[in-house]
Amino acid sequence: MININVCLLSITSNYRLKTKDQEVGKIRRKLRKSFSFAVAGIKYTLKTQPNMRIHVGIAFIAVMAGVAFQISSSEWLALVIVISFVFMLEILNTAIETLVDLYTEEYHHLGKIAKDTAAGAVMVAAIMSVCVGLIIFLPKIIHWFV
């Protein structure tokens, strides 16, 4: 009688393990699918938006300058944050422009406002990133030449 109970306990615990493993596998598949959608959005933005490619090039230069000038941890943090903001806003700008274009192909003043304000957000972030870059790098560049 004891062997039967142990056997039943073993069967039910294996069933629970399989169910948990299946749930974990299901979550992993959904997560992988979500990441692939996000990567596709980033690739689309890089492929179709010249300004995004410019932002990536300038970010690369800023990171290389950070390495060359051996900037501090807090300077790295500021640099990474402003670069990330510019990238995020450029991606959101692309999404907004695409949605407006999906909604209507003819001119509409509200569509223009949506596109202009999204582009303005990118411009503000880009200007702020230049300011942060100047605060970080200008003293180091001046010191390098003096």
Image: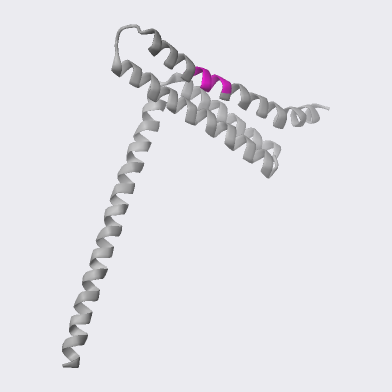
**Most foreground residue, 61 or 85:** 85
Q: Residue at x 41, y 11 (%)?
A: 112
Q: Look at the image and tell me whether residue 20 can be seen.
A: yes
- In this view, the residue farthest toward the front is 110
User: How far across and how far down the image is residue 83, in percent?
Assistant: 56, 32
> Which quarter of the rendered picture does the N terminus lie within?
bottom left
- The stretch of residues the image draws in magenta is 119-124
Q: Residue drawn at (65%, 33%), measured in percent from left and top?
A: 65
Q: Is residue 67 visible?
A: no
Residue 45 location, x and y as percent? 40, 26
Q: Quadrant of the C terminus?
A: top right
Asked whether, in this view, residue 133 is left or right of residue 42, the answer is right
Outermost residue to the right: 146
105 relative to 54, above or below = above
Q: Quadrant of residue 123?
A: top right
Residue 29 lies, with reference to residue 85, above or below; the image says below
Residue under the image location 18 percent in, 90 percent down: 3
